[in-house]
Image (cartoon, grey):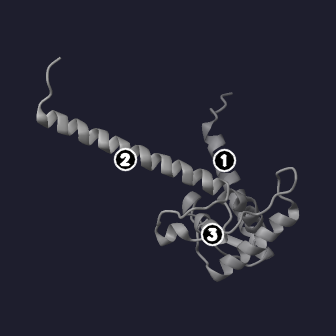
Amino acid sequence: MPRMSNVDQQIRERIESFVRELNALVRRAAIDAVARALDGKPEEPARPAAARAPRAPRAAKSAGGKRTPAQIDATAKRILKHVAEHPGQSVESMSKQLGVITRELALPIKKLVKSGELRTEGQRRATKYFPGGGAAAGAAPKARRAAKAARGAKRARRARPAKRG
């Protein structure tokens, strides 16, 4: 077996030292995680202020895992109040500020838009929400649906071959 040079030996010693330190850090992190899970809560490493901001608890669900109509209505009222105070926000920003996951906002927002209590600008992820005008504003979605149906009928007529007699 060839002898290692002095430089090779120093490199190997440093690598082994690094591995030992890394091993100790991993063990310490695992112990801290177990302690946190058991409510021992040792000191956590410092994180940026944004990461430390407390989150609001998620809305409680009924026994079947589905939200009750009362819970959906309560979320809708929170959304209306929030949009009145902060018009022009996306659903993602509302989700963060209300402490509710985006998926749980979808149904109440859909109902509010349909009833005319909210109006939208933009499409898909660029959709912004604004206070609506109440029941009278609900006519706009019907007009859009009618126009879309008319366009579809026009396309269908163009796609049909002409009858020859």
Q: Position of residue 149 (x, y in %)?
A: 70, 52
Q: Residue at x 31, y 44 (%)?
A: 18
Q: Mark 2: which amino acid?
A: Glu
Residue 94: which numbered mark, if any? Answer: 3
Comparing 154 with 1, the one in front is 1
Residue 21 location (% of width, % of height)? 37, 47
In three-dimensional space, the C-alpha distance between marks 1 and 3, rounded to whole angstroms, equals: 34 Å
Q: Amino acid at mark 3?
A: Met
Relative to 47, is 92 on the left or the right?
right
Q: Which residue is mark 1?
A: 152
Q: Residue at x 68, y 27 (%)?
A: 165
Label 2 sits on a secondary structure element that is helix
> Mark 1 or 3 closer to N-term?
3
**Alpha carbons under labels 2 and 1: distance apart:** 68 Å
Mark closer to the observer (2, 3):
2
Q: Quadrant of the N terminus?
A: top left
Measured as percent of width and height from the top left, residue 31 is found at 55, 50
Q: Are marks 1 and 3 in contact (CB under 8 Å)?
A: no
